[in-house]
Image (cartoon, rainbow, N blue to C red):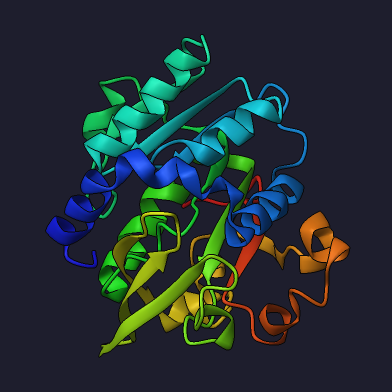
Amino acid sequence: MASFEQVKSDYDAQAEGYNDITHLPCNILETQLLEVALGDCSGLNVLDFGGGSGLHARQAIDAGAASCDIIDLSSEMLRVAEDTEKKLGRSGKIRCFEADVTQPLDQLTSKGLRTQYDLVMSNFCFDHATSQEQLDAMWHNAISRLKPGGRFVGARVGNMKSKACADGKYGVTYKDFQDIPGGIRYRYRIHLKEPIEFEASSLAATYTGNTQIYSKFGLTDVEEVPFMKAKIVRDDSAFWQTFLDDPSMAVVQALKPVAAAA
């Protein structure tokens, strides 16, 4: 991943402030697009791959999911997720598992991780792979636990060099670009009262919008959620025009056919 130690350090150190992003335009957009992609989750068991502090795990529960398991490499982000559940007075809805998702996850099965889920989501997690080998490992780990007939939902980086990411208008900027084989390493800043920064890396196999990686792992019916499905965009399309001209992110949904095998 984009330097395992660096990514873990970034997220561990800034976990406490991460949930504060919910008021930023970029996060409101992501959340509303994911709401469309998730749809009715009534009774579903969901896996949140790289789900951190549980922002979208809680969104899945709010959409009716019976449970949501989070896998993340940051113990501090997972602690925030667990603490939030305690504050909400809930128990057993969201479970947390600490692991490097580029590595085999068999050890988590003995700790209670399900072998099959109705829905798997991965929001920007794949935007930390620094090689095709790592990206493939992450996709394999995610899709191998998606049951045939299940749904995949995920947010991904688009053009991180877009003007939409240049001045913080939407709440995030990207900087310190460095070419790596097949992609770009960079840092992104989230513009809170006390800004937080993280290291990431995106491969062209994902950020260009190419769907071959989805097909490679047996997914079909790959679609990006139209931005106009988000209320925040419909209500003020002029504000979002710079983003719409050259999007810096997208939310994608896909299906795993009943006959497919990861």
Q: Residue furthest left?
A: 5
In the figure, 2 relative to 212: above or below?
A: above
Is residue 15 visible in this depiction of the protein?
Answer: yes
Taking the spot 49% from the left edge, 32% from the top edge, the residue there is: 116
Of 114 and 261, which appears nearest the observer? Answer: 114
Residue at 76%, 74% in the rendered image:
239
Q: Quadrant of residue 133?
A: bottom left
Against 131, residue 72 (above or below) is above
Residue drawn at (21%, 47%), measured in percent from left and top?
13
Residue 162's spot in the image, x, y percent? 54, 86
The answer to whether 181 appears left or right of 262 in the picture is left
Residue 201: name its quadrant.
Answer: bottom left
* Farthest-out residue, right: 235
Q: Is residue 73 left or right of residue 123?
A: left
**Which residue is at a point 50% across and 78% down the rendered structure image?**
207
Q: Picture quarter containing residue 33?
A: bottom right
Q: Quadrant of the N terminus?
A: bottom left
Asked if 70 appears above or below 101 in the picture, the reply is above
Percent coordinates x, y for residue 185 in the rendering: 29, 79
In screen coordinates, is 144 left or right of 240? left
Residue 50 at least partly seen: no
The total number of labels drawn is 0
| Residue 35 rendering spot, x and y as whole percentages | 72, 45
> Is residue 2 rendered to the left or right of residue 201?
left
Between 253 and 189, which is closer to the camera in this rendering? 189
Where 262 falls versus 116 (above or below)?
below
Percent x, y of residue 220? 66, 62
